[in-house]
Amino acid sequence: MQIKRRNFFKLAAVGAGSVVISPRPTRAERKKAGDSFACLVDTSRCIGCRKCEQACNEINNLPEPARRFDDLTVFDSARRPDARRFTVVNRYHSGRIDDAGLLVADYVKIQCMHCLDPSCASACVTGALSKHDNGAVHYDVSKCIGCRYCMMACPFEIPAYEYHNPLTPRVMKCNFCEEQFTRQHKAPACATICPTEAITFGKRTTLLQLAKKRLAKYPARYEQHIYGEHEAGGTAWLYLARVPFKKLGFLTLPSNPLPRLSELIQHSLFSYLWSPALLFALLGGIMYRNRAKNDSGEGHKQSGGVS
Amino acid sequence: MSVSGEHNPAPLRQPLWTPGVIVMLFFMAIGAVAVAARFMFGIGAVANLSNARPWGLWVAIDVATGVALAAGGFTTAALTHIFGRHQYKSVVRPALLTAMLGYTFVVLGLLVDIGRSWAIWKPIFNWNTNSVLFEVAMCVMVYLSVLYIEFLPVVVEGYSGKVSLPRRAARLNGVVEQLLSTADRWLGKTLWVFIIAGVVLSCMHQSSLGSLLLIAPTKLHPLWYTPILPLLFLVSAIAVGYPMVIFEATLASCSLQTDDEMAVLAPLAKITYYLLGLYFTLKGGDMLWRGTWRYLLDGTAQSNAFIVELLCGVIVPWYILRSPQRRQSRRYLFIAATMVVAGVVINRVNVFIIGFTPPLTHETYSPAIGEIAITCGLIAALMFLYRILVTHLPILSPRRKEMLK
């Protein structure tokens, strides 16, 4: 009987294999053709003024922070975005020194990366999280059940949760100020307020060209890498930096979209429910054969159905 | 000893309020207090969950382990009804009851764990077919209904012709009898559909529980992160099905004076021996193939947990069950079965808690008192319901000499 089960898996493996050979275009690949919005953060321009944090707090009506936005001592410890702040700026000392030989800090703003092929949206049970064509990873609270699988899935550990709300907690993360650019044709609040133009808002293809131009024009100023161009299949938020990204708290990520494996397994096994149907038929056949055998052999015993 | 086909499930009709039951009630009361706190002040008030560690004890134990340990329901049903080994009939009902209660408590555990419990129905209307959890949710929902239907014949057998509702409701007796006999007739023809569906649905979501973390390759430790994790979850669930039956049957025969089922349990142990071998081959082969053996002796919490999981849950019980003599020994059988069950618990905890290492925050997690209280309360409630149902419904076979009295 175990052989039958194993046969089933062989079949399933063949099915999965045939899908590997001819993969469907991923969401990232399809989206690359289109032109969605993005932001380019040039960390070499960031001075750590925290104005972006303040603008984000105001536009999203987030609660007053424990320490004021002009308090720069917050940089003494690394912070993460959470349910009360969608973006934070952290300070890093990578060992870089200026002309006078003094240690110089690098500042890095973090927020939702708005991935091209977001793990959170792939994971979300109800599709409460979804990637919009305009580039934003959108959260629709009306569909959310609060399973927090998005938080498990996100490689950037961005979605935060209102753990102290007993009945209607929300997943909290940067929403790309989507309303701003869809309704008012304005850049996100953080990009608008940035005094050093460290954050540039625009179409992703344009921003990638701009980033490459900067890398080519000032090769000594930049690490020759655009973080987010390929990471996790590409993100809408792109970064430039003076030092290796690893030293600025960035993760080294594979360039294929992270949801690809689980989606491949799900779709190759369960599209049109072919494998459950096959297993059902197989087991039905075995059951029928065994019952027929039983009825003829010891029919007096098991004639009364299966219960 | 019970011989094949001769088992006689009957209500146990034993006094319910034993000291053990009082202890269960105590745990249930503490759990209830924690549940009340969770729904008044939020998950954060009772749990150590954070933004980096959004899943903890509740998902690892109540959901993942609960589903795995309820696998006995579908493995015994498959063995007896589909593969026609009717000699195992006596373990089908207790396993079915365990599965039914197990899944019920998976759902109750989920209601505590998810932030918007009242929205638990939303996946029915909002489909995301990319989501592994969506498939798990749908399967668990359908399978729970299937389990209730599969359990109906036991209710019919227990109450058919004996319905006597108290006082006012007494005039409904006839209606209920009618319903029971209709269910009986209808089920006699259709139950096979539900039995097969139960096996199919189980294979689907038991494996998909393993796919859950495939979306987080940077977070799950390489000792566990493998593309065949769903297959490992499925095989381990199938392998733990019979040990769970042995574990429960032994406990029941000790504490509830039920029939001794060694004649059935020993062959189940033999099947388990092969399944453990298959599981170990898959797991070991995968480790060699991906080269993750190099993490084995690095002394981290993860590698130690992996070694404990493999030794306790697979290698030692496999060795115990290897010898036919030991398979005939009630003590060895119980020890091996308990180790396999514990091994699956450790495995699920390892995958969802210990092996889950978010690389940005490096945050660690240990369950809060409130989380433990709720999980223990749920398990106690499950055992309590099991006790009530076997007392009143024909599920276990009372010991022969008692029946002679």
Image (tube, helix red, strand yellow):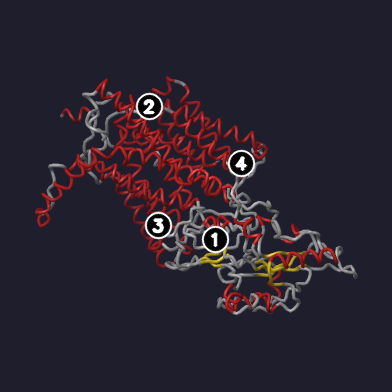
Q: Do the residues labelled 1 and 3 touch (CB within 8 Å)?
A: no
| Chain at numbered mark 3 | B
Q: Nearer the viewer, residue B143 or A65?
A: B143
| Label 2 packing within 10 angstroms: few (<14), some (14-19), many (20+) | some
Name the kind of residue labelled 3 in the image: Ile
Q: Looking at the image, which residue is at 66% across and 40% down?
A: B295
Q: Looking at the image, which residue is at 38% across and 34% down?
A: A283
| Chain at numbered mark 2 | B
Name the kind of residue labelled 1 in the image: Ser
Q: Residue A21 carries which label?
A: 4
Circle 3 sits on which residue?
A: B124
| Label 4 packing within 10 angstroms: few (<14), some (14-19), many (20+) | few
> Which quarter of the rendered picture does the N terminus of chain B lie within?
top left
| Label 3 packing within 10 angstroms: few (<14), some (14-19), many (20+) | few
Answer left or right for A28 relative to B86: right
Q: Are marks 2 and 1 in contact (CB under 8 Å)?
A: no
Q: Residue B330 carries which label?
A: 2
Name the kind of residue labelled 4 in the image: Ile
